[in-house]
Image: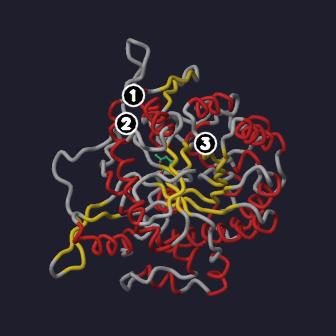
Amino acid sequence: MNKFPKNFVWGAASSAYQIEGDPLADGGGKSVWDTFSHTPGKTFEGNTGDTACRSYAHPEWDIENLKHMGLSAYRFSTSWARIDPEGDGNWNEKGLAYYDRLVDLCLEAGIAPYMTLYHWELPQALEDRDGWLNPETPKAFARFAGMMAEHFRGRVKHYFLLNEPQCVAALGYGNGIHAPGRQEPMGKVFLVWKHLLLAYGLGAQAIRAVDGGAGIGIATTGRLCYPETEADIAAAEKATFQVFDNDWLFTHQMALDPICFGAFPKDCAPGQLRDLMAAVTPEELEIIHQKPDFLGFNIYNGWCVRESQGAPYYFIPRYEGFPRTALKWPVTPEVLDWGVAFLWRRYGLPCYITENGLSCNDVVSLDGQVHDPNREDFLHRYLLCLKNTFSHGTDLRGYFHWSLTDNFEWHSGYGERFGLVYVDFPTGTRVYKDSARWYAQVVKTNGESL
Ligand code: FCB
């Protein structure tokens, strides 16, 4: 079968710091992203999330947009620092009330809330105590996760505990291009990684202790490969799950193997990484090993692989002039076909695409409209491939487009526009892009219009 199943979830995604604005309003605490974006030279043109899309002041704008497109689900994130300003469990009720309002708006509109608990805004107070290098930080996260699940019991049924822990470790503590902007050696980056996995494990336990009905997941990213021809399927699968010492973080399996199987990946050559993995204790692995109810994959592009004589696989180099997005990310729709299927075959859990999309140089044209044929074409190609993943038996439950609106794209600031809905940042005004109307049609026909 290659058809989107009945009840397939069509949604869009966002994250707190990228859209909300007013991070310190009503007693909210500073997060590492507040500190980082206010540090000269860290973000494009010194952009910050101070105002962003004004979603904190006007959550109803986003819900109206979702409703207008006929979407049945919204993946958003909560700002840990807004709710737990000191990272000590002294909850800021007003911050929490904002998410009450957002969740209730979703439910009133018939939109299922998919809540991400941590999309990178570590409370600065915790970073001041050594952030993710401190073994107490996973415990602080679990306290937060448990409180949230208790508070939203019955209203929120799907949680993604962490978004892309890969970026937190590699970009936040490795090369420093993301907050908190640290450049630590591999041993310390691995410690950050271990603590993120422990945060997931302890958080999952805390949520399950208070709400047996909550579904638990994690949204990961990493290298995915797809075969050049039918003859290259096994090679592409092998290349996907190989862990290299110089690129160990950007793999799904470094997170999902310990979480789902209680063990780190075995396809890894001898070296520092192997030693670091071997030093993780069985007790720690037991905490990390909390099997999720579903998995979320953030997928933007992948690698084409060919079986090769003499080597198990060959990464086909991208030719000159290869199609790319405004951010220069390669356009490789095939990754949504076999790439997703490989992950499904390895883990056997229901899957969601929790992010997929592209940045374009969108402008409001003289006619007042935002014409974005590149986004339509990208989406059309990617969704056609996604449709084909069902022919491999993939248990794919939903697709969340990144992003609902243009927003603060981390160190690229407002220089990149990923939204289906255009945002005029000086005023917060929203304008539907052509692609939003196109996507609404796909949603309405459950993919038959593709
Ligand atoms: C992902 C992030 C998301 C957004 C997209 C473009 O890595 O999770 O917040 O920045 O990339």
User: Is 239 positioned to the left or the right of 212 in the image?
Assistant: left
Query: Which of 336 and 441 lies nearest the eye of the viewer?
Result: 441
The residue carrying pointer 3 sits among few (fewer than 14), some (14 to 19) or many (20 or more) residues within 10 Å by Cα, namely: many
- First along the sequence among labels 3 and 2: 3
The image shows residue 265 at horizontal and vertical percentages of: 46, 80
Location of residue 147 by image quarter: bottom right
- First along the sequence among labels 1 and 2: 1
Q: Of the residues shown, which amino acid type is indicated by label 2?
A: Arg
Residue at which label 2 appears: 375
Q: Of the residues shown, which amino acid type is indicated by label 3?
A: Ser
Q: Quadrant of the C terminus?
A: top left
The residue carrying pointer 1 sits among few (fewer than 14), some (14 to 19) or many (20 or more) residues within 10 Å by Cα, namely: many
> Residue 72's mark?
3
Query: Which of 377 and 221 lies nearest the eye of the viewer?
Result: 377
Q: Are marks 1 and 2 in contact (CB under 8 Å)?
A: yes
Report helix, strand or loop for mark 2: helix
- Residue 115 higher or lower than 251, as above or below: above
Residue at which label 1 appears: 362
- Residue 171 higher or lower than 50, as above or below: below
**How far is the residue under mark 1 from the one under mark 2?**
10 Å
Q: Nearer the viewer, mark 3 or mark 1?
A: 3
The image shows residue 54 at horizontal and vertical percentages of: 63, 29
**How far is the residue under mark 3 from the one under mark 1?**
26 Å
**How far is the residue under mark 3 from the one under mark 2?**
21 Å
Q: Are marks 3 and 1 in contact (CB under 8 Å)?
A: no
State the residue at coordinates (63%, 66%): 293
Location of residue 286 by image quarter: bottom right
Report helix, strand or loop for mark 1: loop
